[in-house]
Image (cartoon, rainbow, N blue to C red):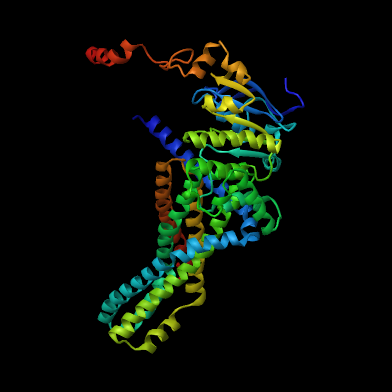
């Protein structure tokens, strides 16, 4: 059950991009204040959809999404925009503005939402970049950054307005081991230092179990398993075991549903012969 | 295909086309409602005027010059047959102001600036930049669409005027400087024949309408892009094709109303 200690929660959420194919089928989850929560699952299981519902980008077909005691689907556009100022979103590949420098990217939220002087914005931008270790790249172009650096600049931009909740969409995708570890540690450190809460959508079981407080496994539109990293590591649940150990076959089958082999391979030959 | 299926397909196509037009109209209204940011943060609009207008100057001026020179050569050749070579200046000025200036400048603008606007917005969409903006509580319609729309609408009529000016200058160089026609006859006949309301004002009205058509198409197609490399490519092509056809159709309609009694 959601409590006042939760910064956000999903309550019996149903959602589908098309009515005939539900992506989420009655999901409930809690994001406690100050914690880092990971949402894991196979590709296309609806992890990113959960982030989008939390950010109010989409509305659930049924159920409720709550952020900071507000029902997100019921918010008007101005209220939604006001809510998003208390939310940080890190996109899979950073989504930095390519027509701006690193400095201008991080200054963007300040310039859009505050009346701060340029001197103050300058100091704040450098502080945010320093927090992610990239003060030295402040005046670089975004196309000069590596994937990991771009992700860190995007993180500096996302925390610019000191959000209550950070949403990370696949923050480890395509990173080398060093960058991966740096981004992982940054997520944990910023969460604790800024006193915020974080939701992490990821495939990277090894890295995420090192930094998160709680894990939800999503599959077939439902929550298949949940628990602390210790509980997940020692779980005997076949799905969790398959995911944690990266086994190719198990509750999540190697082959997706298809017609029987004989029908698929010989069906056409049989049809041609019949003609 | 039987007639029922054919009618069904025709009906479906018509409904889809009307729905698409309705969608564009709603987008247009949304851009207009988000205009205040383009005004209050003039820096954003000035940047777009630079990209759409200033960077199009070379192609507009050079094209105008050549169109004017070619028109003067052809006009002189034909008019001298009837002993009316003094009217070359009038021919070029009328052709440029009434038709070629706004139309050709708009077609060039669609190819140079319209395609660039669509590609830029499309790429922003494909790389989640528009979504990132929304997640930072910044409306992309106000921050991206409105400044680009007004930047294009302000630039295009000025470019059309410069295009016509360059063409008349090109005609002057050919007929007066090269062929040796009388300077006074060239300018005098032109001054006597060109009517401010009928020719100049109608030219400005046409170029403003074309500016709205090109820029709205470019911005809309950018926002409506499928977020893939192929999607951006086909949206850019659609901008040039749709805007060009719409310009020619709108020109025909406006010409009927503007010059039918002449």
Q: Nearer the viewer, residue B238 or A89?
A: A89
Q: The N terminus of chain B lies in which quarter of the figure?
A: top left
Asked whether residue B234 is in view, the answer is yes
Residue drawn 47% across and 56% down?
A: B214
Quadrant containing the C terminus of chain B is: bottom left
In the image, taking residue B261 as reference, residue B183 lies left or right, namely: left
Looking at the image, residue B95 lies above or below residue A263: below
Percent of width and height locating residue A43: 49, 25
Residue drawn where x is 65% and y is 57% of the image:
B36
* Residue that lies at the very extreme toward the right in this rendered image: A4
Q: Is residue B18 visible?
A: no
Is B165 placed left or right of A15 in the picture? left
* Residue under the image location 47 percent in, 46 percent down: B123
A140 with respect to B9 (left or right): right
Is A171 drawn above or below residue A236 in the view shown? Answer: below
Above or below: residue A192 compared with residue B175: above
Residue B5 x, y percent position in the rendering: 39, 30
**Relative image position of residue A225 (x, y in whole percent):** 59, 16
Placement of B66 over or under A121, stated as above or below? below
Q: Nearer the viewer, residue B123 or A214?
A: A214
Residues A74 and A183: in front is A183
Q: Is residue A260 left or right of residue B44?
A: left
Q: How many marks?
A: 0
Where's residue B23, x and y in %? 54, 44
């Amino acid at each position: 059950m959601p409590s006042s200690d939760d910064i956000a929660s999903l309550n019996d959420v149903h959602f589908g991009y098309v009515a005939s194919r539900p992506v989420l089928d009655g999901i409930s989850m809690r994001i406690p204040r100050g914690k880092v929560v990971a949402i894991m699952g196979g590709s296309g299981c609806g992890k990113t959809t959960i982030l989008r519902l939390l950010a109010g980008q989409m509305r659930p077909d049924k159920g409720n999404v709550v952020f900071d005691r507000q029902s997100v689907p019921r918010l008007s556009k101005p209220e939604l925009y006001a809510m998003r100022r208390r939310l940080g979103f890190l996109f899979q590949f950073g989504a930095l503005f390519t027509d701006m420098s690193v400095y201008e990217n991080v200054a963007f939220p300040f310039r859009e939402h505050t009346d701060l002087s340029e001197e103050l914005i300058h100091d704040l931008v450098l502080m945010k970049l320093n927090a992610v270790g990239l003060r030295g790249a402040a005046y670089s172009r975004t196309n000069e950054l590596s994937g990991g650096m771009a992700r860190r600049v995007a993180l500096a931009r996302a925390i610019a307005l000191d959000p209550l909740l950070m949403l990370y969409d696949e923050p480890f995708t395509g990173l080398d081991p060093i960058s991966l570890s740096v981004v992982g540690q940054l997520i944990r450190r910023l969460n604790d230092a800024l006193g915020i809460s974080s939701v992490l959508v990821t495939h990277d079981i090894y890295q995420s179990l090192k930094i998160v407080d709680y894990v939800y496994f999503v599959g077939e539109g439902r929550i298949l398993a949940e628990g602390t990293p210790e509980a997940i590591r020692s779980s005997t649940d076949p799905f969790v075991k398959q995911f944690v150990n990266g086994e190719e076959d198990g509750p999540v089958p190697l082959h997706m549903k298809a017609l029987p082999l004989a029908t698929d391979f010989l069906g056409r030959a049989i049809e041609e012969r019949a003609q | 295909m039987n007639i029922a299926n054919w009618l069904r397909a025709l009906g479906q196509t018509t409904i889809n086309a009307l729905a698409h037009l309705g969608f564009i109209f709603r987008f247009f209204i949304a851009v207009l409602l988000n205009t205040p940011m383009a005004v209050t943060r003039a820096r954003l609009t000035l940047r777009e005027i630079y990209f759409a207008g200033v960077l199009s100057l070379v192609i507009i001026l050079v094209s105008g010059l050549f169109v004017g020179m070619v028109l003067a050569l052809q006009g002189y050749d034909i008019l001298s047959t009837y002993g009316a070579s003094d009217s070359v200046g009038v021919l070029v000025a009328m052709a440029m102001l009434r038709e070629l200036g706004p139309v050709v400048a708009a077609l060039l603008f669609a190819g140079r600036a319209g395609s660039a606007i669509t590609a830029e917005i499309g790429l922003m969409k494909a790389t989640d930049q528009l979504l990132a903006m929304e997640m930072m509580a910044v409306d992309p319609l106000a921050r991206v669409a409105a400044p680009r729309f007004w930047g294009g609408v302000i630039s295009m009529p000025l470019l059309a005027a410069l295009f016509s000016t360059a063409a008349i200058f090109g005609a002057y160089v050919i007929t007066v400087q090269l062929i040796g026609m009388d300077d006074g006859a060239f300018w005098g006949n032109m001054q006597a024949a060109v009517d401010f309301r009928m020719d100049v004002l109608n030219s400005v009205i046409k170029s403003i309408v074309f500016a709205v058509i090109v820029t709205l198409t470019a911005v809309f197609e950018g926002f409506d892009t499928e977020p893939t490399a192929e999607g951006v490519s086909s949206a850019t092509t659609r901008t040039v094709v749709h805007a060009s056809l719409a310009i020619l159709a709108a020109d025909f309609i406006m010409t009927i109303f503007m010059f039918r009694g002449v």
